[in-house]
Image (tube, helix red, strand yellow):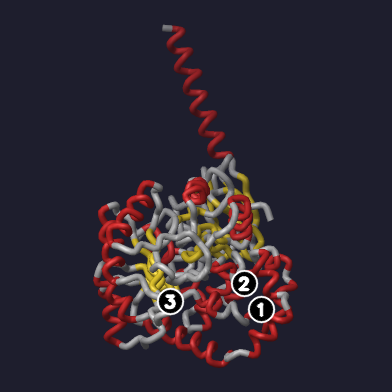
């Protein structure tokens, strides 16, 4: 009996010691202005408690108790927002380079990304490890190799799936399912003879086969007839905006009834001239490290600059204004808008991390409020990626993953303050700057 009591006493002390140790691991951020990502008003003089990689509590100082043995950090004067999300990324590079780009994105506060269409089987496996926290990186979702028509868009030399028949398309989907991809990507653009579109029949086969494997579809789409065909098949996740349509009340009602979401990819749309018109941006050392080497070479090429600025720039800028009007009308009509910059696309000068910030700025230029743009780049993007109303990340709420960005200035006052990053946390771990 004595030995049994002694064993129980030792066991109890061990449990208590472990509880004390657990309490000691809590990190408490004291006094910041908290923007939780859900779209509600900011919380002044907040307390955010992080423990074991998750938000233990968050709210006003008067309502959130501070754990006794926690590590306390005074962040008065700072602003806390959820980690940012980019739903439209490409990582067509070596595995080592991809890991470098992922860390670059983290340092810009991008804690979740989706890679859409250019990932080899080896890259898929590595990106799954990133998502599962095997190494310091954003949480990454991947589509593996996407789908397009033979000789269709995109025009760069990537070995994506280009099925010529419905059965070939189904076989390609089954291969991706075996790789456990998170999404299936389809490019639908062209149709002008020289750049054929993937046929409606093959699209339908891809969607049907993906549904059998419970894999969602994400579609690059720029024409209204293609949008409607895919939406009628149950596809809801759209990249870009239609170039041949305005957001009429009927189209807005249709998009809302189908549960569509749009990632407009503004940042890539202006990439052909943005850095040529604003060369001082390139003096930012953080931005310099965010470009793919080929993109960096391009934005510093005087001949490329001269050619870009001599082209039909006014027409291209008007196209962005049209896209702004489309997105603003959709947002006002209750259609979900999310952030997706198309970073890495065709190795264009769309810098990792920096383009995400620019995309969010452009959502504000389109007419969204800063708070709505932040929600688009946090909770609403998380909802689309996870297909749930209450994802485990995307907002700073008790129980959610501790992905957050600590800023030196308030982005709800000026969205450009997103760039004033003090620290980034991914899964409760501070990211080295």
Quadrant of residue 354 within the rendered picture: bottom right
Regarding mark 2 in the picture, which secondary structure is present there?
loop
* Residue annotated with mark 1: 275
Sequence-wise, the earlier of marks 2 and 1 is 1
Residue 85 spot, x, y in % from top left? 50, 63
Q: Nearer the viewer, residue 48 or 358?
A: 358
* Residue annotated with mark 2: 349
| Left or right relative to 189: residue 79 | right
Q: Nearer the viewer, residue 150 or 158?
A: 150
Residue 125 in view = yes
* Residue annotated with mark 3: 195
Q: Which residue is pictured at 48% across the width and 12% down the height?
A: 6
Q: Nearer the viewer, residue 6 or 433?
A: 433
Sequence-wise, the earlier of marks 2 and 3 is 3
| Left or right relative to 77: residue 394 | left
Instruction: Give the total number of marks visible in the rendering.
Output: 3
- Marks 3, 1: nearer the viewer: 3
User: Are the residues at dot 3 and dot 1 in contact (C-beta closer than 8 Å)?
Assistant: no
User: Are the residues at dot 2 and dot 1 in contact (C-beta closer than 8 Å)?
Assistant: yes
């Amino acid at each position: 009996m004595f030995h049994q009591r002694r064993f129980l006493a030792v066991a109890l002390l061990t449990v208590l010691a472990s509880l004390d140790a657990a309490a000691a691991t809590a990190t408490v951020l004291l006094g910041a202005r908290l923007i939780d990502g859900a779209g509600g008003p900011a919380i002044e003089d907040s307390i955010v408690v992080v423990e074991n990689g998750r938000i233990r509590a968050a709210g006003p100082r008067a309502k959130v108790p501070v754990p006794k043995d926690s590590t306390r950090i005074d962040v008065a004067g700072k602003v806390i927002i959820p980690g940012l999300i980019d739903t439209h990324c490409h990582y067509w590079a070596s595995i080592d380079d991809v890991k470098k780009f992922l860390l670059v994105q983290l340092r810009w506060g991008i804690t979740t990304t989706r890679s859409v269409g250019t990932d080899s089987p080896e890259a898929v496996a590595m990106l799954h490890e990133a998502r599962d926290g095997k190494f310091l990186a954003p949480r990454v979702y991947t589509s593996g190799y996407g789908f397009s028509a033979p000789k269709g868009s995109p025009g760069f030399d990537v070995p994506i799936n280009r099925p010529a028949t419905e059965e070939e398309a189904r076989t390609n989907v089954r291969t991706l399912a075996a790789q456990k991809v998170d999404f299936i990507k389809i490019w639908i653009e062209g149709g002008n003879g020289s750049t054929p579109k993937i046929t409606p029949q093959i699209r339908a086969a891809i969607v049907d086969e993906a549904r059998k494997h419970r894999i969602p579809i994400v579609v690059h789409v720029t024409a209204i007839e293609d949008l409607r065909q895919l939406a009628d098949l149950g596809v809801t996740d759209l990249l870009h905006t239609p170039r041949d349509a305005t957001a009429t009340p009927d189209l807005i009602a249709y998009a809302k009834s189908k549960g569509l979401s749009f990632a407009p990819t503004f940042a890539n749309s202006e990439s052909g001239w943005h850095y040529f018109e604003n060369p001082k941006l390139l003096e930012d050392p953080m931005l310099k490290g965010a470009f793919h080497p080929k993109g960096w070479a391009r934005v510093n090429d005087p001949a490329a600059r001269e050619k870009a600025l001599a082209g039909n720039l006014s027409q291209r800028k008007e196209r962005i204004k049209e896209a702004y009007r489309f997105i603003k009308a959709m947002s006002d009509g209750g259609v979900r808008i999310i952030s997706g910059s198309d970073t890495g696309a065709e190795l264009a000068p769309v810098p990792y991390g920096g383009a995400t910030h620019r995309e969010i700025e452009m959502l504000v230029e389109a007419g969204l409020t800063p708070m709505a743009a932040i929600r688009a780049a946090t909770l609403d993007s998380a909802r689309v990626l996870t297909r749930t109303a209450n994802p485990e990340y995307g907002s700073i709420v008790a129980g959610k993953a501790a992905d957050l960005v600590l800023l030196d200035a308030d982005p709800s006052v000026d969205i450009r303050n997103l760039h004033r990053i003090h620290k980034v946390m991914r899964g409760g771990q501070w990211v080295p700057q």
